Image: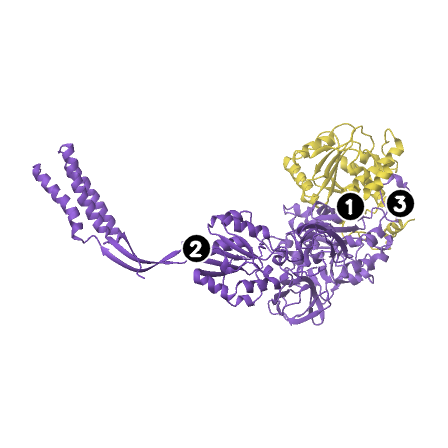
Chain colours: A purple, B yellow
Amino acid sequence: MQLPWRSSIVFEPLVVPWVFGLCLLALTLTAFLLWKASGTLASRRRRILFGFRLVVLLGALVTLAGPTLRHERVRSIPGTVLLLVDRSASMDLATRREALRRVLDLQQIKKLEERFSLLRFAFSSGLEAWNDNSLAEAPTGDKTNIINSLEEAVAVVEGSPIAGIVLITDGVDSDARLEAKARAKALKVPIFVLAPPSASSRDLALSASDESPLAFVRNTRLIKVKLSARGVSGMEVIVKIEAPGTAERLQRVKVQGDAAEIELEIPFKPMRVGRQVLRVSTPLVAQEEDETNNVLLLPMDVVRDRLRVLLVAGAPTWDVRFLRRLLKEDPGVDLVSFFILRTPEDSNQIPEEELSLIPFPERELFEEQLHTFDVVLFVDFNFAPYSVGRYLGRIRRFVEQDGGGFAMIGGMRSFFEGQYQGTDIARLLPVAITEQAADLRPFMPKVLAPNHPIMALGLDSGSEDVLAAMPLLHGRNRLGEAKPGASVIMVHPEHTEASPAPIMVAAPVGRGRALALAVDSLWRWQLSAAAKGQKARPYYRIWHNMLRWLSGDPAFSRLSWEELPSDLEKGRRLQFSLRLRGHDWKPLADANLHLTLKNPDHKHRKVKGTTDKEGRFAVDLDPLESGPWNLEASALLGGQELARSEAVIIAGQASAERRLVGPNATLIKELAQASGGVAYDWNERKLSDLPFDETQRGERIEAIRSEPLWNHPLWLLFFLIPGLLAIALRRRWQLA
Amino acid sequence: MDRRTFLRAAGLMGLLPATSAWAFGRTNQLTFALLDTADERSRRVAWKRLGLEVEARTSITVVPQPLLVDGGSDAIFNYPLLICSGSGELPAWSAQRWARLAHYLRSGGMIIFDQAQEDDGFSKACLQRLARQLPKGAQQQLTKDHVLYRSFYLLETPVGRHLSAQQPQAALVDGRMVALALEVDLAGSLLRDEFGAWAYPCNPGGEAQREQAIRFGVNLLMYALCTDYKADQVHIPFLLKRRR
């Protein structure tokens, strides 16, 4: 068949643009000069003469623009159909994968391609390239954004006539937007949605409604969980809640309606800090479509809102007065303090009702309430007169087993002077108690571990320089050798390896931490330092750092986790590093690291390795089985444990996408209607039967022929005649 | 003879080395650091007496000899409690010295002005002058609910050689009492003459008032060392019960 030709005038300039611009300027100037030069003529004559001259100038200009007659031979072609297939994880159900294979049958595709120009795409959070083999693989997209994907597809064929869009989806959109309807309408292309039927399946799914996985220790937090139910109207669902350290609880929920969403509020009161996993689950219902979304593992980072500190002082002293003030002024500290104001040896002739004294509640503190504290401080406190001896073992267990912090601060009632040798506290302390009387001489301590986080004074100069300018400390308890694994942070100037004289020693003990400080005059770094105009900052920083370290602040741990993910996708390898620091807080090489991973099914994985010169050990493990895994790492050198650390990760948990129970019939219908399309049950409608707009056709130019007009003889006449007329008129009007 | 008396006696007899007991150095113990005024010198013994009473009644240990310190020197920063006894007009201290004293208080120190003569305005004048160097609103009148009155004994007003109809003026910084203006001559009530007899009578309460003055002195020192410890929540149920 002979195709028609279509003609049009186009311009193909004879000169480059800047030359054309110069010519335009020159011609404009010429026109202006000619107009001025004809100023002596009568008005009518002047206009006629100028009109002819102007035609000549315009003719020259148009000639330079290169007028050309273009002839095109055009072929009409079919419109484009965009086919978008949802490859997000919510489509990874046996019924949906089967339906997809059926809908995208080769015969159907072929039929469609005969009528239209077909462009195929996959999509999840955005548009993806189509791969013919992808139908054989499970869809894995962890998010869906339908409207963005539609817009991106339309943009790909911008300007081409689109006969329609085929959207194959369950409508589950993790990023659903309110304006989706308006945006679908703005595409001006009918969207035909092929979606699963909404009434055919049953599913229960749990998903987290709260974004913040944070809870405060000893505070109840209501965690919001959403139960999505489909096809189980009227059923009573039992939701099981399991939290670490508490008995499991059951919550009954009545489901109303075929597609129901029920908000549950689950109280969670953690009793210890660190990451903990809350497990919420529902039983499987008969013929449940998706069995992976009935269990929700919620990792909760439990932190302290306030550090609970128990301060026990053997007597009111200046040291404890300044320390208590510092702790009371800190909004991050919840302080309970007890001072022994009267000893059994003091006069007790005054009737009790005239005194403000209260009995020392040793049983309440050390038996009933001990677990509620994060840190216990014994400040110049001798246990013997107050029946506290029987509780010293509890304090040791509070540190070693429960992960608490304990510090003994010096004074004439501490360490040897307080007769702690041979007690559980002596075993707990990171340093040996020497049976030598206190040294009363003033001195300036030396910093032995300037890199230790307790000595991070936050000042420009180093901690040694800062402390060298501080007032002398007065007296010390004599302490012996630091225990293995302990960090000797400050020492007496007479300290030698042969004759140790530690002042501040800290060490992890079991799950907790213990610290010994052998002075009772640290207050002088506040008040006495002020005499020289020195700020009390070192005093405050050292104490705050001590408390953070004692409370087990992860930032103060010698063994830390680097790049450890909180969630591990199914099938992905677990890769992270462990970093170890030595007693002096510098990277420690050649230490042995033992890592154990355990899950609730008592499955273990063990890894051993050695730290490199940066103190690092890189871990690369095969994918873990789904569920929560507790990670316990310990570092050993010469058979001695240096540090330990714990973490939790969740492996292979169903993504948020899998927890959105589809199909979302509302969104599907809205998109179709807003765009002028229709939503169909994919079991009932074939791809090739969709009512595309056949009038939307494109065209293809198959041949082009150009005929320049500017060199045509008639064209020359067109502006030569006005020129000749202008010359003739000039002569007739006898112009020079 | 109790243990402490025995130890003290033994120390005097040279049986034990004469080291500072219950703290590593003198400056770590409660020391009566007296600002060097004429009245202070004459009343040093009174503070020593209070020290003995405090040691006998409480767990506080005290450096036995009160010290005279130069209020213009850096030495005051070694003693978190200063005592200034006086009478009559404001001491003739330079503005720099008042400013230094205020710096000492803001840094954690405390001062007690004790007025030797009834109604001569010494303590109040000192406090007013000092308050000019402290944050606005620092000067306040104490109430009978202040923790000072329950730091050891349960009391309601300051007691000394005299009684005052009004609660005393004080300076508070961040809730902590940093200065107290006493008008009851606390030191006078504790002073003995060279024959061991009380130097001044206590009016109007006589010897019972003197015992109350000692108790107030104990509370004052207990507050200096514990500040608002007795305002902690754990003490409140006990104290409310006893107040009833």
Q: Is residue B92 visible?
A: no
Which of the pair A147/A342 is nearer the observer? A147
The residues bearing labels 3 and 1 have C-alpha atoms spaced at a distance of 19 Å
The quadrant where residue A163 appears: bottom left
**Mark in the foreground, 2 or 1:** 2
Seen as rendered, the residue at the extreme right is B1
Which of the pair A725/A602 is nearer the observer? A725
Q: Are marks 2 and 1 in contact (CB under 8 Å)?
A: no
The residues bearing labels 2 and 1 have C-alpha atoms spaced at a distance of 101 Å
Q: Which residue is mark 2?
A: A694
Check disc 2 and give the amino acid type: Glu
Q: Residues within 10 Å of mark 2 (few under 14, many from 20)?
A: some
Label of residue A704 in the image: none
x and y, in percent, of residue B216 in the image: 82, 37
Decide which of tag 2 and tag 3 comes sooner along the chain: 3
Which of the pair A310/A464 is nearer the observer? A310
Q: Secondary structure at mark 1?
A: loop
The quadrant of the rendering that contains the C terminus of chain A is top left
Q: Is residue A267 left or right of residue A685?
A: right
**Mark in the foreground, 3 or 1:** 3
Q: Is residue B68 visible?
A: yes
x and y, in percent, of residue A693 in the image: 45, 54
Q: Is residue A109 left or right of residue A219?
A: left
Q: Which residue is mark 3?
A: A347
Check disc 1 and give the amino acid type: Leu
The quadrant where residue A118 appears: bottom left
Q: Secondary structure at mark 3?
A: loop
Q: Chain of mark 3?
A: A
x and y, in percent, of residue A506 in the image: 71, 60
Q: Chain of mark 1?
A: B
Q: Which residue is mark 1?
A: B30
